[in-house]
Amino acid sequence: MDKTDIKSMNLEELTEYITSLGEAKFRAKQIYEWLHVKLVDSYDRMSNIPQKLRDLLTENTTLVALKQVRVQVSKEDKTAKYLFQLHDGNLIESVLMHYHHGNSVCISSQAGCRMGCKFCASTLDGLARSLTPSEMLDQIYRIQASTGERVSNVVVMGSGEPFDNFENFIKFQQLLSDENGLNISARNLTVSTCGLVPRIYEFADMCLPTTLAISLHAPNDEMRKKLMPIANKYSVREIVEACRYYVEKTGRRVTFEYSLVKGQNDSAECAEQLSRLIAGLNCHVNLIPVNPVKERNFERSEAADINKFKNKLEKNKINVTIRREMGKDIDGACGQLRKHYKDEIADIVKE
Ligand code: SAH
């Protein structure tokens, strides 16, 4: 049987577990603090916990602590990309970005991805597996512990589709915002989805103040199907409808991500169609010049076309920004560092 994943438990569950071992309740609070506030990576460092209990926990639980394999720091903007190894050898990546308002960490929700978006490196080798709540949390914990700087914002925009790992994502969010833990409010959390419509409704019904980002990337189904296989399942209209519901339920503005691919989705007509599609919705559009992935032949749009696209949206009273690109010199886009590392290892093995 699998060992108990201690870092995926909330305080209530941990208290139940610790008392079931015949230990006093206050030990749970102490251990929870070591795990989620002091961010230690082993039981040996829990100095106020008796050795006997530490041994018992070592025997019966797993304490997830990600192994840092590689860090690449951008010379341009200090953005740092971390490659972590999971206990089973799978690799995931996370990114630390420095903003005026604080440090933001972008985490992965799965090792690989099965959504198959054509421009994305994370999906090239398919889905290896979903991450546990503890593995999502520990990306933030390891980065905060190693830099010694507080993380104030989290975005779930790394590899994987968080709504394809829904239950674990929800548990992760609960632990992240727990006032006994790192206490990062749902307001400072953004989750990005390719648009799994039933999950958007489910998430809306939880009435959390999380920012929802939708990877739209096209203003109609025909065009979207060429970029994202998920478009065969849910239409852009259904997605926008679900977003309206989200805004109604949570009072939060929705973000649409739109990666601009030269000659595919960057025309003035596309901007018009997009404006009509989302008119009247409390939303914001984030334009991202596509980051070319070596395995695919997508090119980024010309700067002039990007500006035209933006101006068109603005003229139609749509809030829009062009995403500031960070860490372009360090395999910035989704899944690129992991993919390069895996290719490098494969080359070494072949030699
Ligand atoms: N699966 C989720 C979250 C991960 S991707 C989702 O689809 O939203 C985070 C964002 O980066 C998504 O909008 C994704 O479409 C985009 N993205 C992935 N690869 C990219 C690339 N090479 N260039 C530009 N944007 C990319």
Image (cartoon, helix red, strand yellow):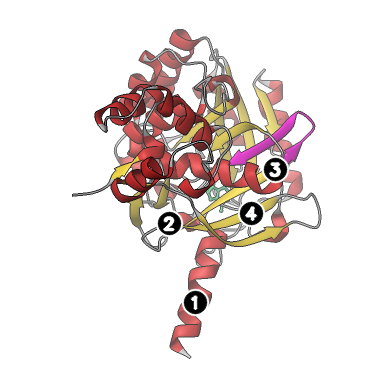
Label 3–label 4 contact, CB within 8 A: no
Query: Which residue corresponds to mark 4?
Result: 81
Local secondary structure at mark 4: strand
- Label 3 element class: strand
The reply, left or right, for residue 69 in relation to residue 97 is left
Horizontal and vertical percent position of residue 210: 51, 21
- Is 213 located above or below residue 82 in the figure? above
Does dot 2 land on a helix, a strand or a loop?
loop
Residue at 48% of width from left, 50% of height from top? Answer: 65
Circle 1: element type: helix
Q: Tell me the magenta residue range.
A: 97-106
In space, the residues marked 2 and 4 are separated at their CA atoms by: 16 Å
**Which residue in the structure is indicated by mark 2?**
86
Which one is in front, 12 or 147? 12
In the displayed structure image, the side of residue 231 where residue 182 appears, left or right: right
For marks 1 and 2 on the same chain, the one whose residue lies earlier in the sequence: 2
Q: Amino acid at mark 3?
A: Met
